[in-house]
Image (tube, rainbow, N blue to C red):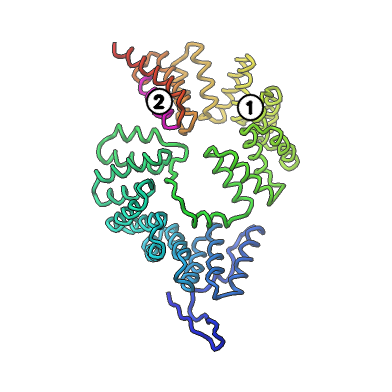
């Protein structure tokens, strides 16, 4: 990078060889995003020697996924202000996200030099060093991060990777175990531990870790990073808030998800998908009056959305309005007769009303459209067990074990029961152990107590 700044007679700085700003915006932008990026570009062009404005335009491009276009903006901002750690940090991240890890090392190293106490900076630098084929240097950086914060699961995970890459598998295993201990819901950490067990020939331990992988199957450990939070906050279009709401809802953070969907609607009140998702989140929160208001507004823009009617029906079930819920599920099936979720939900309502034959019919219709539907498989299996068809029930219950979430331990409990009834006690014991491990890892204390009692009884029975 060439930088030459000289003082004019007026005392102002002149630009000589700074990295240029992009000459135009990326093609194919929505009007909303084009307006946001266009405003940032105009501000940067109006003050070409303002590092902050060049960097903020880079952040806007980066936040909307245009990493390559953001690079010269960050390079320019860094050239204009060598004391601000944001610009080399964001530059390193943008390069790393494109797989250009060797090129990311220099700016990330500069950021660390400016802010040596930042664990987040060190984790980023260590990762790019490792991806650049420098495990020894990477290990030293991760070790430094752990000197600052021994409870950083991300740093332990990185150190484990560095040690494994250097061939020190015992040290790698210790680091991975600590990472999983600190971040038990990080699929990334648990998957790395499973692979390490496998490399050591400990297949049973590897399988156990893979079975415990949670719904965020490759979610890395959390790293508190205000600069990444600032980058993510740049996006303010309706889609970004919808995506954020989906992410939060997937983590069970329903209040936060509802706020994200509401923010999307502030930007576009006619955004049917955001309102549909908001009906779901509010229903789960028990805020039925608010959910009803959004359901009515959603009907104005998306009256034929099967998802909307399913979400509203689910909210009504939680409120105990079962007849209204059934009507909503039936409306979804009028729109799409193959809607597996609506069939499964309607089947459960029929079960509750004592209509077992109708329930089974809808469970089977759900499985015709979606053979892996968990609810339909689970509830149909319950009917099969009651009819003495435990072996057939097992084939359905095996399909409920994935993905791993807060319901999985209950599904495995049902599978273990079916194994017992089918006189397959070995698989029953193994399945109960899996269910118990999951219940404990998910904090389901009461369920764990029940599982432990049944497991002890079954182990005693099989030992006779």
Which image quadrant: the C terminus?
top left
- The secondary element bearing badge 2 is classed as helix
Q: Nearer the viewer, residue 105 or 375?
A: 105
Which SS type dominates the magenta stretch? helix
Residue lying at 57% horizontally and 71% vertically, measured from the top left: 23
x%, y% of residue 173? 28, 42
- Above or below for 192 versus 417: below
Which disc number belongs to residue 14?
A: none
Question: Badge 2: few (under 14), some or many (20 or more) residues near its Cα, within 10 Å?
Answer: many
Q: Nearer the viewer, residue 156 or 274?
A: 156
Q: Earlier in the sequence, mark 2 or mark 1?
A: 1
Task: Describe residue 301's horizontal placement relative to residue 159 as left or right.
Answer: right
Q: Please say whether residue 435 is one of the residues in the magenta stretch.
A: yes
Residue lying at 54% horizontally and 57% vertically, measured from the top left: 63
x%, y% of residue 442? 45, 32
The part of the image, by quadrant, that contains residue 427 is top left
- Above or below for 217 versus 457: below
Which disc number belongs to residue 436?
A: 2
Residue lying at 64% horizontally and 66% vertically, measured from the top left: 39
Magenta residues, start to end? 428-442
Question: Badge 1: few (under 14), some or many (20 or more) residues near its Cα, within 10 Å?
Answer: some
Q: Which residue is mark 1?
A: 318
Which image quadrant: the N terminus?
bottom left
Task: Describe residue 148's horizontal placement relative to residue 328 as left or right.
Answer: left
Residue lying at 38% horizontally and 13% vertically, measured from the top left: 423
x%, y% of residue 341? 59, 30
- Above or below for 170 versus 138: above
Q: Nearer the viewer, residue 337 or 105?
A: 105
Q: Residues under labels 2 and 1: Cα distance?
A: 27 Å
Q: Residue placed farthest to the bottom in the image? A: 9
x%, y% of residue 264? 65, 48
């Amino acid at each position: 990078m060439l930088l030459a700044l000289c003082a004019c007679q007026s005392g102002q700085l002149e630009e000589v060889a700074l990295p240029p700003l992009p000459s135009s915006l990326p093609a194919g932008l929505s009007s909303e995003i084009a307006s946001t990026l266009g405003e940032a570009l105009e501000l940067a062009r109006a003050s070409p020697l303002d590092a902050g404005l060049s960097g903020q335009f880079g952040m806007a491009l980066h936040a909307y996924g245009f990493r390559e276009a953001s690079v010269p903006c960050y390079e320019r901002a860094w050239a204009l202000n060598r004391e601000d750690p944001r610009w080399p940090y964001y530059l390193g991240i943008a390069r790393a996200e494109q797989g250009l890890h060797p090129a990311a090392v220099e700016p990330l190293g500069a950021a660390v030099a400016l802010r040596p106490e930042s664990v987040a900076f060190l984790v980023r630098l260590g990762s790019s060093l490792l991806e650049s084929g420098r495990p020894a240097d990477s290990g030293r950086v991760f070790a430094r991060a752990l000197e600052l914060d021994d409870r950083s699961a991300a740093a332990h995970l990185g150190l484990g990777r560095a040690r494994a890459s250097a061939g020190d598998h015992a040290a790698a295993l210790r680091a991975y175990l600590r990472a999983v201990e600190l971040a038990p819901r990080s699929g990334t950490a648990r998957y790395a531990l499973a692979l390490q067990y496998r490399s050591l020939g400990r297949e049973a331990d590897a399988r156990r870790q893979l079975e415990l992988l949670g719904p965020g199957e490759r979610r890395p450990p959390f790293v508190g990073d205000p600069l990444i939070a600032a980058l993510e906050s740049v996006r303010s279009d309706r889609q970004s808030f919808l995506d954020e709401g989906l992410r939060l809802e997937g983590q069970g953070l329903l209040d936060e998800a509802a706020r994200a969907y509401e923010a999307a609607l502030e930007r576009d009140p006619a955004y049917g998908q955001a309102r549909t998702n908001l009906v779901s989140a509010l229903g789960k929160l028990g805020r039925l009056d608010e959910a009803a208001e959004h359901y009515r507004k959603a009907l104005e823009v998306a009256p034929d959305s099967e998802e909307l009617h399913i979400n509203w029906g689910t909210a009504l079930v939680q409120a105990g309005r079962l007849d209204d819920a059934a009507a909503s599920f039936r409306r979804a099936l009028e729109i799409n007769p193959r809607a597996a979720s609506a069939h499964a939900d309607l089947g459960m309502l029929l079960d509750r009303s004592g209509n077992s034959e109708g329930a089974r019919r809808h469970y089977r219709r759900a499985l015709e459209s979606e053979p892996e539907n968990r609810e339909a498989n689970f509830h149909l299996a319950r009917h099969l067990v009651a009819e003495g068809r435990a072996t057939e029930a097992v084939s359905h219950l095996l399909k409920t074990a994935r993905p791993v979430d807060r319901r999985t331990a209950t599904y495995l409990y049902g599978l273990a029961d079916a194994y017992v009834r089918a006189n397959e006690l070995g698989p029953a014991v193994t399945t109960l152990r899996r269910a118990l491990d999951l219940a404990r890892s998910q904090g389901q204390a009461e369920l764990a107590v029940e599982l432990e009692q049944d497991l002890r009884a079954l182990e005693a029975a099989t030992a006779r």
